[in-house]
Image (spheres, rainbow, N blue to C red):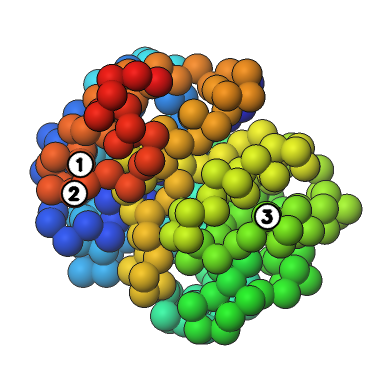
Amino acid sequence: MIKIVEVGPRDGLQNEKSILSTEDKFKFISLLCDAGLRTIEVTSFVKAPAIPQMADAVELYTKVKNELGDRGVAFPCLVPNMKGYETAKNLGVKEIALFTATSDSFTKKNINATVDESFERMKEVADAAKRDGILVRGYVSTAFGCPYEGTMDVKKLISVTKRLFELGVYEVSVGDTIGVATPMQVRSYIRALKSEFPIGKIAMHLHDTRGMAPTNIFVSLEEGITTFDSSAGGLGGCPYAKGATGNVATEDVWYLLNSQGLETGIDIKKLSEASQFILSRANRQTESKFLRAYLNTGKV
């Protein structure tokens, strides 16, 4: 079975200007559970002024844990530093995500630190998580291209990925933050990663800015990738990457995988209901080509 990591509640909503209620976010997550998603990134423990949408992280995660904790779903949360980690640990979060990039320019805009400095911050968190028995996943932004530095050398991706595994992460999610990756580039970079790391520990986090995400996912599948991040309805973007539209839509990923006879455990009708709900609350039109066609025709 292919693993889908649903990032809509966190990565999908973090850049939305209208602040959604905690109740709406919770209902969205509940509907995603109903649709068969088994890994749903709930929120991020960051300073509210930095990302106002995540200001209710404690309240939201507490509600998710108390009311959905018995559903057999993993609810990871993004953690930027030790303060965020301590909050997550005290709430009973079982899995966290750490993030860095291949580009110093991007990390300076994002977290006011170089890539090296980001690792200094992450090490303290990773060491604490290891002691506390909390799973850690790693994100690498700008793996293929940076809005400030252009195309990124695969050697930087290899170096950053190696350092994340040395921290103790169980998986590295490779991010096409601004949606510039091409199939040839994706194939080349994955083959470089495969020469250094177990392919089962690499995931892909692709944005569909230029309409290439599904094709890039197909290439990734051919190269042995079995875990993909996606966002219901195609919600998302990056506040530090101008013009970067949302993550690839979970519906579009489902359609591609389903066409190849690959099982995801997702009920597409229920997933579309979850997406319609949150899109209506965010006053947004969907970026998902599949969802638009499905809503127009009623047919898969």
Name which of mark 2 and mark 3 comes first in the sequence. 3
- At x 69%, y 44%, the residue is 220
- At x 66%, y 75%, the residue is 152
Numbered mark located on residue 279 in the image: 1
Q: Is residue 39 left or right of residue 71?
A: right
Up the image or down, 165 lies above or below 256; here it is below
As helix, strand or loop, the secondary structure at mark 3 comes to helix
**Circles 1 and 2 in contact, beta carbons < 8 Å:** yes
Query: From mark 3 to mark 1, how far is it between C-alphas?
Result: 30 Å
Q: Categorize mark 3 by other alpha carbons within 10 Å: few (<14), some (14-19), many (20+).
A: some
Disc 3 marks a residue whose amino acid type is: Pro
Q: Which numbered disc, 2 or 3, marks the residue closer to the eye?
A: 3
Up the image or down, 293 lies above or below 153; here it is above
Disc 2 marks a residue whose amino acid type is: Arg
As helix, strand or loop, the secondary structure at mark 2 comes to loop
Q: Position of residue 227 (x, y in %)?
A: 61, 37
In the orientation shown, which residue stands out farthest toward the front? Answer: 297
- At x 21%, y 33%, the residue is 276
Query: From mark 1 to mark 2, how far is it between C-alphas?
Result: 5 Å
Q: Nearest the camera: 105 or 219?
A: 219
Q: Nearest the camera: 69 or 257?
A: 257
**Circles 3 and 1 in contact, beta carbons < 8 Å:** no
Q: Where is residue 90 in the image (x, y as percent from the top left)?
A: 36, 42
Question: Looking at the rendering, which quadrant does residue 252 occupy?
Answer: top left
Q: Categorize mark 2 by other alpha carbons within 10 Å: few (<14), some (14-19), many (20+).
A: few
Name which of mark 1 and mark 2 comes first in the sequence. 1
Residue position for label 2: 284
Tell me if I can see residue 122 in this picture: no
